[in-house]
């Protein structure tokens, strides 16, 4: 059995918790709308013919494939997490890059852009315009924080 995604959406979230970094991560997933799924991290390929859609409701407990970036931190820190994705100009799918940074997102966007450009170079193919989904937060003192960004696959052929 081969699962080839046909639809995907992008999402992001951020949150803080006074309990732990794990709880901040859980809250960030809820903020992103993907906190009730069993997430399975996959690598970076958007299959040919896949369609970007708006966020959809996914049943609770569903095994859900996604390309996900997360960054956790503690009070007083600024953290960022994001993804960048681009489709090939020849129409044969696309690619996703993840990044995370202990710092503001203005340093993350150039890093993600470099990653996508190298993906294009090593494949010797041109990409359409790169799209970015980035979250940043300054974590309140005495709290834990987490930022997440994800490309979530929803349907398969």
Image (tube, grey):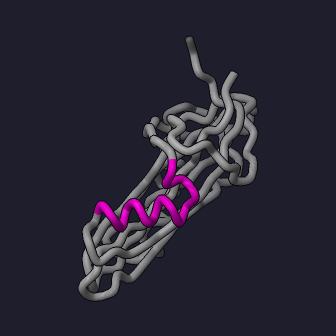
Is residue 31 in the magenta section?
Answer: yes
| Residue 83, placed above or below residue 77 | above
Residues rendered magenta in the picture? 22-36
Q: Nearer the viewer, residue 18 or 44?
A: 18
Is residue 18 in the magenta section?
Answer: no
Position of residue 11 measured from the top left corner of the image (x, y, whole percent): 59, 58
In this image, 34 relative to 41: left or right?
right
Question: What residue do we see at 59% from left, 21% from top?
Answer: 3
In the rendered image, the quadrant that contains the C terminus is: top right
| Residue 21, placed above or below residue 61 | below
In this image, 29 relative to 8: left or right?
left
| Residue 108, placed above or below residue 7 | below
Position of residue 153 measured from the top left corner of the image (x, y, whole percent): 61, 39
Question: What residue do we see at 49% from left, 48% from top?
Answer: 97
Question: What residue do we see at 74% from left, 53% from top?
Answer: 54
Outermost residue, top direction? Answer: 1
Q: Nearer the viewer, residue 100 or 14?
A: 14
Question: What residue do we see at 37% from left, 62% from top?
Answer: 25
In the rendered image, the quadrant that contains the N terminus is: top right
Position of residue 15 measured from the top left corner of the image (x, y, whole percent): 43, 72
């Amino acid at each position: 059995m081969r699962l080839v995604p046909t639809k995907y959406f992008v999402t992001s979230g951020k949150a803080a918790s006074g309990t732990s970094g794990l709880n901040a991560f859980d809250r960030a997933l809820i903020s992103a709308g993907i906190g009730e799924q069993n997430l399975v991290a996959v690598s970076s390929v958007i299959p040919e013919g896949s369609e970007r859609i708006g966020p959809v409701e996914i049943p609770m407990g569903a095994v859900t494939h996604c390309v996900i970036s997360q960054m956790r931190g503690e009070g007083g820190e600024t953290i960022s997490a994001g993804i960048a994705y681009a489709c090939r100009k020849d129409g044969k799918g696309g690619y996703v890059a993840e990044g995370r940074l202990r710092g503001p997102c203005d340093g993350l966007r150039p890093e993600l852009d470099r990653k996508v450009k190298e993906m294009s170079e090593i494949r010797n193919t041109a990409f359409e315009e790169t799209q970015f989904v980035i979250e940043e937060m300054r974590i309140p003192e005495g709290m834990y924080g987490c930022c997440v960004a994800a490309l979530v696959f929803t349907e398969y052929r």
